[in-house]
Image (cartoon, rainbow, N blue to C red):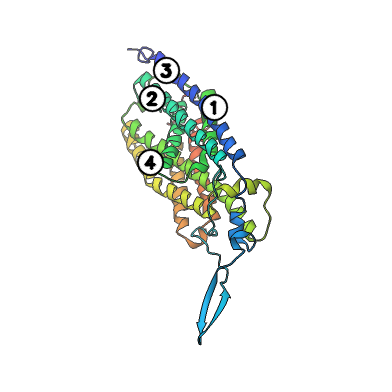
Amino acid sequence: MTLAAATNENMAQISNVLIYSSMAVYTLAFLAHIAEWVFGSRSKVGRTAAALTSSGPASAEAPKVQVTKGGSTAVLDRPKVVTRSAAGTRDVPDGPGAHGGTEQGDMYGRIAVSLTVLAALIHVSGVVARALSVMRAPWGNMYEFSITFSAVAVTTYLVLMALGKNVRWMGLILVTTVLLDLGIATKWLYTESDQLVPALDSYWLWIHVSTAIFCGAVFYLGAVGTALYLFRDSYENKLASGGKPGSFASSVLERLPSAASLDKFSYRINAAVFPLWTFTIIAGAIWAGDAWGRYWGWDPKEVFSFVTWMAYAAYLHARATAGWKGRKAAYLALFAFACFLWNYYGVNMVISGKHSYAGV
């Protein structure tokens, strides 16, 4: 049987149509998210400022403490205490979200989430159709890896939301990057549906590459949280020092969760998936032993997978070290994710090695 005969061209075409259709729905979701931010009320701006400064209605009447001595009572102002989270950021309330706590903004937000769910269903169907066209795992080249990666990222986001986690603030950035990922995949990475090269024709493709895709998608969510943490932390620090942020910060950053919440989210999600990334590298080594007769050969993909592991290990260790909390650790987390991106795009497209069968 020839490779062409082993490929269901009709199913491959259906996959392409579904991927393009999902991009169209993601675009509508993008516009709905924009509307959520635009029409969401800015009336709640100042919650963080009220928590960090002595001005504003939240602190206009400070709590009192009563001190009783010798039958008389003295009422004293309670000293203003600003606490700090484990990340080194001040404990302030989370923002109301992109919708700004208003009914109109919330309506657009719900429309955006609904459209994202629909787009994700179409997107996942496109990935499944691609798999059915050749009856194998749909991640045998860079195009397939990319469409699966973004599908897993969106699905993970929606699952977290369904579990009641406060991640709706990520919607606009997520949809934007998914559109970018699918645009790059369909424009520059597209590969005709075909059978695998012999080195990839193994059950380890289901195990090793699927875990790599899932880890990358979750690392991406953590990177988004980390990047927004840096912006929000700068905003809170400026308020605490008596500065006056610009209109962008007041209308956008104020609506995000607090820096402490963003930092906690990023740390927890990176820490949760790190053991699976460790397994990914081990599984890859076992597969290399079966395919090439050696477990480790310093191939560029192997090297940068390990570099990524080291970077995330250093980040997690830094979080347990007093001098590397907050922004320093955040920079390290972003560097670790940059290593992951380089391992995918850079190593596959620039450096030649045993993994250079990306099909670009």
Amino acid type at circle 2 is Val
Q: Which residue is mark 2?
A: 128
Task: Kindly check if marks 4 and 1 are in contact, taking CB atoms under 8 A apart as contact.
Answer: no
Mark 2 and mark 1: span between their CA atoms?
19 Å
The CA distance from mark 4 to mark 2 is 25 Å
Amino acid of disc 3? Ala
Q: Amino acid at mark 1?
A: Gly
**In the foreground, 147 or 52:** 52
SS state under label 1: helix
- The x and y percentages for residue 108 are 54, 35
Task: Determine whether label 3 and label 4 are within 8 Å by CB.
Answer: no
Which residue position is annotated with label 1? 183
Quadrant in the picture for residue 123: top left
Which residue is nearer to you in this view: 167 or 89?
167
- Residue at position x 39%, y 21% from top? 129
Q: Secondary structure at mark 4?
A: helix
Q: Disc 4 versus disc 1: distance between alpha carbons?
A: 29 Å
Residue 84 showing in the rendered view:
yes
Residue depth check, mark 3 versus mark 4: number of the one nearer the observer: 3
- Which numbered circle lies on residue 12? 3
Circle number at residue 254: none
Q: Earlier in the sequence, mark 4 or mark 2?
A: 2
Q: From the image, tell me which residue sits under label 4.
A: 281
Report x, y in % for residue 273: 40, 45
Q: Farthest residue to the bottom: give it.
A: 70
Q: Are dots 2 and 1 in contact, CB under 8 Å? A: no
What amino acid type should be assigned to the residue bearing mark 4?
Answer: Ile
Q: Are marks 1 and 3 in contact (CB under 8 Å)?
A: no
